[in-house]
């Protein structure tokens, strides 16, 4: 550690559509929803993260909530900058006479454009970062899972986040081929909201849709240890009166089928594009799942049935990408695949 290392604050950020995770000193110090609340009249941001999420869907006409990221990329530059700045302030660091310089590694979807990539770096720099490097999400996920990405062995990663699903084959410290699709956890939520409206004539919000996914979401109707039916509360679309209905995992599995099929198609496409020698490796090592979407009941089994390959779910799928980004931060000048 250098003489003036205390003047540098190093952070790793998993800047997700649904959640933002910050790692500092090898620990997760911030894990907050990627959302801000602001006053409509002044544009002043009044809350970020969990506090803003509590307001989501419940605001009056003078307050609105914004998700700064959509489909894994920055959709609202100003809100993203403010959110990053405020979340970095949440890190409990002893005060010093000299404000520390920020060094960041931020993970990004593998399929984003140069303009979208630039927006991430600009937001980080506007939020106070002096040095920023980027890492593609599948690479971060692989590192976080514990795979030695520098080895001459092929590994397939499927990272299902909130805004994107990233499918990549990794070997020798690089992404050999990848498929990034904008079908992921948020789409599962919308599928459920639409289904509840069509099938049950009940209107629910995003938070309730996500709750249903967590409580009774499934990728197939034939799963081990199915969850109990779940009571859903919303507004009756015919009478306008609040009501309760019970939903079961099998009907949710059916309503998610189309979105999951899109992910399966992307996986098969990535496998088709994989060089033969790496295909042989993947036959032995299997497929690794990470991201919040990988926690959907029966998803690993469904992908196994589709590909006939072993499928492994990461130990802590929600934080695999953040953990890998943190390891990349420690190897800031060593990992050649980091994007300057």
Image (cartoon, grey):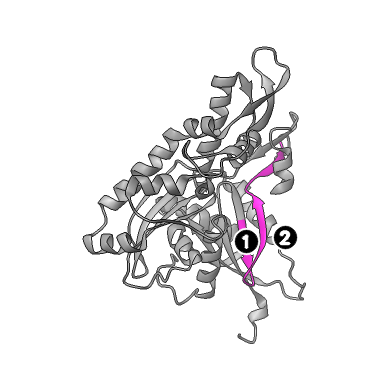
Residue 236 quadrant: top right
> In the drawing, does residue 138 fall left or right of residue 1?
left
- Can you tell which mark lies on residue 90? 2
- Relative image position of residue 76 (x, y in whole percent): 57, 44
Q: Residue visible at 42% across and 33% down?
A: 258
Quadrant in which the C terminus is drawn: bottom left
Q: Which residue is mark 1?
A: 22
Q: Residue at x 34, y 45 (%)?
A: 306
Magenta span covers which residues? Answer: 21-39
Q: Which of the 4 quarters of the picture holds residue 207?
A: top right
Q: The residue tagged with tag 1: helix, strand or loop?
A: strand
Residue 66 drawn at (x, y percent): 63, 40
C-alpha gap between disc 2 and disc 1 = 10 Å
Position of 100 compared to 106: left or right?
A: right
Above or below, 283 against 211 in this view is: below
Residue 159, placed above or below residue 102? above
- Residue 44 visible within the image: no
Label 1 CA crowd tier, 10 Å (few <14, some 14–19, many 20+): many
Furthest-front residue in view? 225
Question: Was residue 28 drawn as part of the magenta stretch in this picture?
Answer: yes
CB under 8 Å between discs 2 and 1: yes
Quadrant containing the N terminus is bottom right
Compared across the picture, whether 117 is left or right of 282 comes to right
In percent of width and height, residue 152 lies at 31, 72
Main SS, magenta region, reads strand
Image point (50%, 37%), residue name? 187
Looking at the image, the residue that sits furthest to the bottom is 3
Q: Secondary structure at mark 2?
A: loop
């Amino acid at each position: 550690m250098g003489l003036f290392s205390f003047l540098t604050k190093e952070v790793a950020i998993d800047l997700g559509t649904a959640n933002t995770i910050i790692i500092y000193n090898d620990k997760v110090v911030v894990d907050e929803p990627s959302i801000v609340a602001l006053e409509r009249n002044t544009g002043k941001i009044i809350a970020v993260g969990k506090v803003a999420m509590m307001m989501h869907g419940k605001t009056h006409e003078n307050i609105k909530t914004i998700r700064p990221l959509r489909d894994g990329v920055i959709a609202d530059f100003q809100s993203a900058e403010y959110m990053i700045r405020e979340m970095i302030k949440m890190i409990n660091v002893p005060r010093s006479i000299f404000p520390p310089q920020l060094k960041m590694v931020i993970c990004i979807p593998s399929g984003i454009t140069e303009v979208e990539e630039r927006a991430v770096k600009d937001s980080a720099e506007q939020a106070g970062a002096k040095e920023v490097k980027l890492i593609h999400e599948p690479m971060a996920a692989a590192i976080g899972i514990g795979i030695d990405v520098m080895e001459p062995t092929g590994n397939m990663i499927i990272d299902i986040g909130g805004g994107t699903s990233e499918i990549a084959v990794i070997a020798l410290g690089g992404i050999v081929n990848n498929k990034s699709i904008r079908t992921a956890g948020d789409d599962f939520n919308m599928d459920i909201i639409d289904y509840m409206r069509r099938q049950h004539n009940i209107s629910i919000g995003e938070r309730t849709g996500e709750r249903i996914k967590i409580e009774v979401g499934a990728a197939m109707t034939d799963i081990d240890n199915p969850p109990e039916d779940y009571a859903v509360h919303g507004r009756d679309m015919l009478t306008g009166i609040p009501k309760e209905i019970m939903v079961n995992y099998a009907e949710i599995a059916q309503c998610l089928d189309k979105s999951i099929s899109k992910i399966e198609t992307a996986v098969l496409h990535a496998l088709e594009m994989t060089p033969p020698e790496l295909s042989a490796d993947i036959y032995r090592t299997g497929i690794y799942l990470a991201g919040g979407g990988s926690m959907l009941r029966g998803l690993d089994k469904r992908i196994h049935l589709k590909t006939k390959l072993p499928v492994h779910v990461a130990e802590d799928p929600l934080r695999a990408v953040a953990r890998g980004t943190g390891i990349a931060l420690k190897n800031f000048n060593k990992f050649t695949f980091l994007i300057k």
